[in-house]
């Protein structure tokens, strides 16, 4: 089983809709959870991080973490065409000094 | 958020030459930096973990004599691609771990696009 798995996508939503991106992880010792956005030809950009169970909101983005289910998600409200990108889920484990374990990414397209 | 820079942003070199890429944390000190490589339409691949003042830790399959990493200070890590070949052409990205707050979020540099002719 892969360390981090994301819904494969691609995901396509209309402008103004809610985009839901999901991620599961296999190691119960995972400590920190991150969502990165990567535009084509660019490097990843950190958009959300969450460490505790529950929801964390930042503007149009909400990250949700459920450690019992080993599940983390990202909701993007009022999606905009500029949100079209690949979204990478990443986790860290306590034993590996901050190394990120990435999912393969979900490509999101928001159409006008 | 923290800022990480890379230099150069792109470079073209001839086969057999060496290329040095710099990664700097601009507004924080980073004891740990990471080097990634990404081929078109593929996932990020971790090459090595760079720790200030000690030898880098390389991932399996990455040649440490070909990809020399030096983390000489708390704000600078360098990656030197030695005797570059066309198959080394790729997008090289560094990241730095900001441990000032939280559990150490990682921020990526803008990347360096290497083309070996």
Image (cartoon, coloured by chain):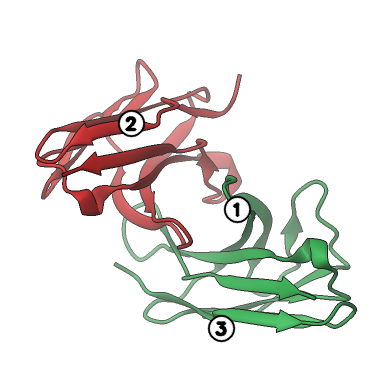
Chain colours: A red, B green
Discs 2 and 1 share one subunit: no
Quote the CA–CA distance across marks 1 and 3: 20 Å
Label at residue A61: none
Is there any visible trace of residue B22 in the rendered image? Answer: no
Helix, strand or loop at mark 1 = loop
Label at residue B40: 1
Does the CB distance between marks 2 and 3 fall below 8 Å?
no
Q: Residue at point 39% right, 32% down?
A: A10
* Left or right: residue A10 compared with residue B90: left
Label at residue B7: 3
Say which quadrant the C terminus of chain A sits in.
Answer: top left
Residue holding disc 2: A11
* Left or right: residue B20 compared with residue A53: right
Quote the CA–CA distance across marks 2 and 1: 20 Å
Among the 4 quarters of the image, the one containing residue A14: top left
Q: Position of residue A76 (x, y in %)?
A: 19, 39
- Furthest residue toward top: A69
Q: Is residue B15 above or below residue A19?
A: below
């Amino acid at each position: 089983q892969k360390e981090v798995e994301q819904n494969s996508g691609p995901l396509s939503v209309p402008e103004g809709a809610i985009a839901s991106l999901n991620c599961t992880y296999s190691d119960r010792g995972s400590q920190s959870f991150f969502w990165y956005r990567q535009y084509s030809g660019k490097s990843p950009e950190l958009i959300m991080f969450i460490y505790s169970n529950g929801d964390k909101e930042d503007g149009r983005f909400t990250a949700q973490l459920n450690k019992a289910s080993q599940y983390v998600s990202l909701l993007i409200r009022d999606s905009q065409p500029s949100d079209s990108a690949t979204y990478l889920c990443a986790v860290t484990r306590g034993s590996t000094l901050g190394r990120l374990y990435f999912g393969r990414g979900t490509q999101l397209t928001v159409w006008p | 958020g923290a800022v990480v820079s890379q230099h150069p942003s792109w470079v073209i070199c001839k086969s057999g030459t060496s290329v040095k890429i710099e990664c700097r944390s601009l507004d924080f000190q980073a004891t740990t930096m990471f080097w990634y490589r990404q081929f078109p339409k593929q996932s990020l691949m971790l090459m090595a973990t760079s720790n200030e003042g000690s030898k880098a830790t390389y991932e399996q399959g990455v040649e440490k004599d070909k990809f020399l990493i030096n983390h000489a200070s708390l704000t600078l890590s360098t990656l030197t691609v030695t005797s570059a070949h066309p198959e080394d052409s790729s997008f090289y990205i560094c990241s730095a771990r900001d441990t000032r707050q939280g559990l150490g979020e990682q921020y990526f540099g803008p990347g360096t696009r290497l083309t070996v002719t």
